[in-house]
Image (tube, helix red, strand yellow):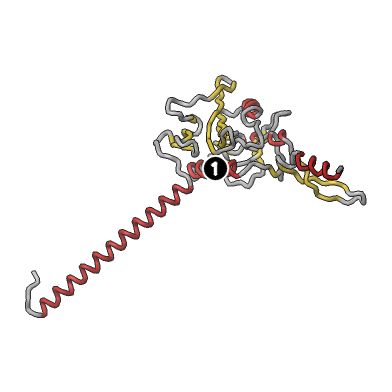
Amino acid sequence: MTSNKADRNAELAPDPFRYGWRQVERHRTDGTLELVEQPLGPDDFLDPQPGDVMIQGALHFECVNDLYNRLALRYRDDPATAVFADMKMLWGIPGLKQPAPDIAVVPGVRDKGADRESFDVVAEGTRPCLVIEVMSRNYAGDDTKKPAIYALAGIPEYLILKPYGQHGERELSLQGFRMVRGRYQRWRPDADAWFRSDRVGVGFRVAADRRHLELVDLASGDRLPTLAELAQAREQRAAALATADAERARADAAEGELERLRARLREQGIDPG
């Protein structure tokens, strides 16, 4: 009975690794060292360490990956603006937590292609102008604890994408904060529901189906495409070129056949006209 009750209690107990884990060294009784996995807690999301494994979920990964790809493509030819995903920020401010934002757009970067494990804003001489966090069902601090951190760190614009609805279904929503006279204020979308970023010149909006995010270049009005849309466009161009090539081949074949008929008529002394 005791064993069965213990088993049931173990089944009901929350998973200690539900937030993730960190490998740490531990001394064995014989004095040697071993690596063990130490469970992470919610506050570790505010100040992760290199090598931490954080449980976020497939929808979180999809949204972060999509944002990174579209913004990185926009700045592909800009040598001074970098887009980072999950890059730990070192503020150089004593006592201030140092998160690893899901997305950070950083202008004025001297060496965009450097192999960084973290971003030291003091050493780099610049800081993100826009941070985007994608909320996870596993951690609710993106809209409660991180705004104060990013405000103190001097981040001008902070967007928060919530990718799921009340019952865990895919349903996107956006909120944000902007620096106004040195303090964060709620970032209000315009009448068309666009969050217009002055810092990066991009508009962000949840699509009408609430399942996708729309991004637009504010200067040109062009949409920032997803990788799937780019792949579809390439396939359509390839199909159009193949069709054009086939039509040219048919036209050349028809012209060749017509010329052969004319040649036979001339051999028979008939002017083909």
- Find disc 1 in the rendering and name its residue: 68
Q: Residue furthest bottom?
A: 268
Vertical placement of residue 30 versus 189, above or below: below
Q: Position of residue 119 (x, y in %)?
A: 64, 39
Q: Nearer the viewer, residue 85 or 114?
A: 85
In the drawing, does residue 239 fall left or right of residue 37? left
Residue 176 picture quarter: top right
Using the rendered view, name the quadrant where residue 52 is placed. top right
Q: Amino acid at mark 1?
A: Tyr
Q: Residue 200: percent from the left, percent from the top?
A: 50, 34
Q: Total label count?
A: 1
- Looking at the image, is 150 positioned above or below residue 268? above
Q: Residue furthest front?
A: 1
Looking at the picture, does residue 243 appear above or below residue 25?
below
The picture quadrant where one finds residue 130 is top right
> What residue is shown at x 48% (from left), y 42% (from top)?
74
Percent of width and height locating residue 182: 59, 21
Q: Residue at x 71, y 45 (%)?
A: 51
In the rendered image, the quadrant that contains the C terminus is: bottom left
- Residue 261 falls left or right of residue 5: left
Residue 225 position, x and y percent, is 45, 43
Q: Identify the secondary structure beneath mark 1.
A: helix
Screen quadrant of the N terminus: top right
Residue at the location (48% across, 34% down)?
206
**Which is nearer the eye, 235 or 210?**
210
Residue at figure coordinates x 24%, y 67% from the top left: 252
Residue that extends furthest to the top in the rendered view of this protein: 181
Q: Is residue 73 visible?
A: yes
- Circle 1 crowding by C-alpha within 10 Å: few under 14, some 14–19, many from 20: many
Query: In this orientation, does residue 123 appear?
Result: no
